[in-house]
Amino acid sequence: MSPNPNRPSDPSARFTSECRTAVAAAEEAGALLRSRFPDGFAVRPKGELGDVVTDLDLLAERLVVDRILERFPHDRILAEESGELGGDGGGRTWLVDPLDGSNNVVIGLPVCVVGVALCVDGAPVVGVVHEPLSGRTWSARRGGGAYGPGGRLAADGRAPSPAGPLLAWTQGHAVRRDDRTARALRHTVELGSRRLLQLWAPLLAWAMLARGDIDGFVGYRAEAIDLPAGALLAREAGVAVRHLDGREFTGGFTGPDTERSFVAARPETLPYLLELAAGAGAGVPEPTPSYVPPWSGV
């Protein structure tokens, strides 16, 4: 039977080839990184704010970019170290973060991932996060769910602790150390959490949130290159992602970084995080005092 042209296509069947390509490229890059960790690489400063780049970043990025262009030669690519590559893409843009967590690797901390995303007209449709040292991969397609080594991901797998939520924090490289909004927001979130993780590898925090290992994630002017893959992975696992004022957050890479501040959490935890953001005075409405966190026991 021929398909009905008037029937909408199944979103879960779209972008399968792109997702397979991204997974294969990320895992191949991960094998390269694993072979050179912990000390088989050179390091140099990147910018004036204390960031670094290693030759591992460059080698892994070249590998991932080459694999994407072999399969999709006309697509546009934005890579962390090399910038814009490939064609105009016709609305299709790949984002490549070859080593999210370079600063960790440099100090011998084995906390890093490879991230690959495909965005169509600015919105993420494929997201892949690969952890080189464990060999684990998590992937998502828009409308097709999120998957990891154990099968489909569901962020609601862990009951909230009565001691409060376990949260993660990230902020963009351009945020100044004396940024009052960032300081107030981070301080308020930390006071309102059981623990606040600052991993220096945002994609790993997104994967932890999608797996249900942590309760929420707060970002202030987040980096564009790694945001789409992580946000899509979490959203497809059932995580709610919002701007600080509660608006729907698409997780795209375009626009100013002021539009990349977010709270992400399981639905039952989201109102509490929005209250924390409001309490920090992050340019959002006052919190709703009637909300009772699910771990309060009330």
Image: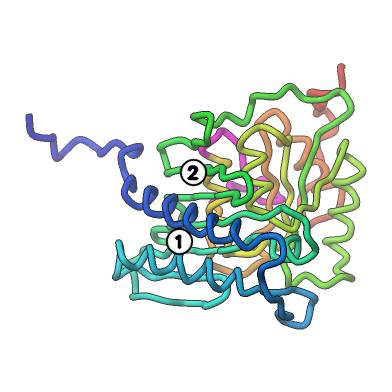
| Amino acid residing under circle 1 | Gly
| Amino acid residing under circle 2 | Ser
Identify the residue at horizontal 67%, vertical 55% (top origin).
Answer: 112
Outermost residue, left direction?
1
State which region is magenta: 236-250
> Mark 1 = which residue?
122
Q: Quadrant of the C terminus?
A: top right
> Mark 2 = which residue?
139
Task: Determine whether, in the image, residue 250 is placed left or right of residue 186.
Answer: left
Q: Residue 200 appears at what percent x and percent y?
A: 74, 58
- Determine if the magenta segment contains residue 238: yes
When the figure is inspected, residue 61 is found, relative to residue 268, above or below; the finding is below
Q: Quadrant of the N terminus?
A: top left
Which residue is more in the foreground, 152 or 296? 152
Q: Residue 48 appears at what percent x and percent y?
A: 77, 82
| SS for callout 2 | strand
When the figure is inspected, residue 132 is found, relative to residue 71, above or below; the finding is above
When the figure is inspected, residue 275 is found, relative to residue 22, above or below; the finding is above
| SS for callout 1 | loop
Q: Earlier in the sequence, mark 1 or mark 2?
A: 1
Identify the residue at horizontal 70%, vertical 49% (top origin).
Answer: 245
When the figure is inspected, residue 113 is found, relative to residue 52, above or below; the finding is above
Asked where in the image residue 51 lies, by quadrant, the reply is bottom right
